[in-house]
Amino acid sequence: MSVATNDQITMYSTPWCGYCKRLKSQLDREGIEFTEVDIEQVPDAAAYVMSVNGGNQTVPTVVVKPTSGSEQIAMTNPSLAQVKAAVAA
């Protein structure tokens, strides 16, 4: 698997979210770059998260632009393995 660049993965999160902290730690440990967006500070980001989560502000919501250039993938509370698979898709 190629290592993702920070424009391939966007993680929508909040500072208090334990699931967000865990996934960030796992991505960092694997050397996978990502861009983090705090939905409590960016209203448009909160609206986007709600649009892909049935109206809920569920975090972490991770959006991946696959290496193949196919359509982006939005995932709610994904595992590290799911993020890696989405990048490689």
Image (spheres, helix red, strand yellow):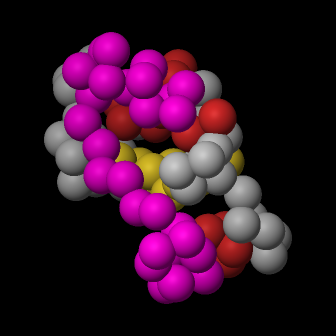
Looking at the rendering, in which quadrant would you find the C terminus?
Answer: top left
Is residue 34 inside the magenta stretch?
yes
Question: What residue is rendered at 53% in x and 68% in y?
Answer: 39
Near-viewer residue (62 or 57): 57
Is 19 drawn above or below residue 59 in the view shown? above
Near-viewer residue (6 or 59): 59
Q: Is residue 2 left or right of residue 56?
A: left
- Magenta residues? 21-48
Q: Is residue 42 visible?
A: yes
Question: What residue is rendered at 50% in x and 57% in y?
Answer: 12
Q: Is residue 32 left or right of residue 17?
A: left
Q: Quadrant of residue 22?
A: top right
Q: Where residue 14 sits: x, y (%)?
A: 56, 55
Is residue 75 inside the magenta stretch?
no
Is 12 drawn above or below residue 50 in the view shown? above
Q: Where residue 81 sits: x, y (%)?
A: 53, 20
Q: Where residue 30 sits: x, y (%)?
A: 31, 15
Near-viewer residue (65 or 60): 60
Q: Quadrant of residue 55?
A: bottom right
Looking at the rendering, in which quadrant would you find the N terminus?
Answer: top left
Near-viewer residue (88 or 51): 51
Q: Is residue 18 left or right of residue 65?
A: right
Is 24 drawn above or below residue 16 in the view shown? above
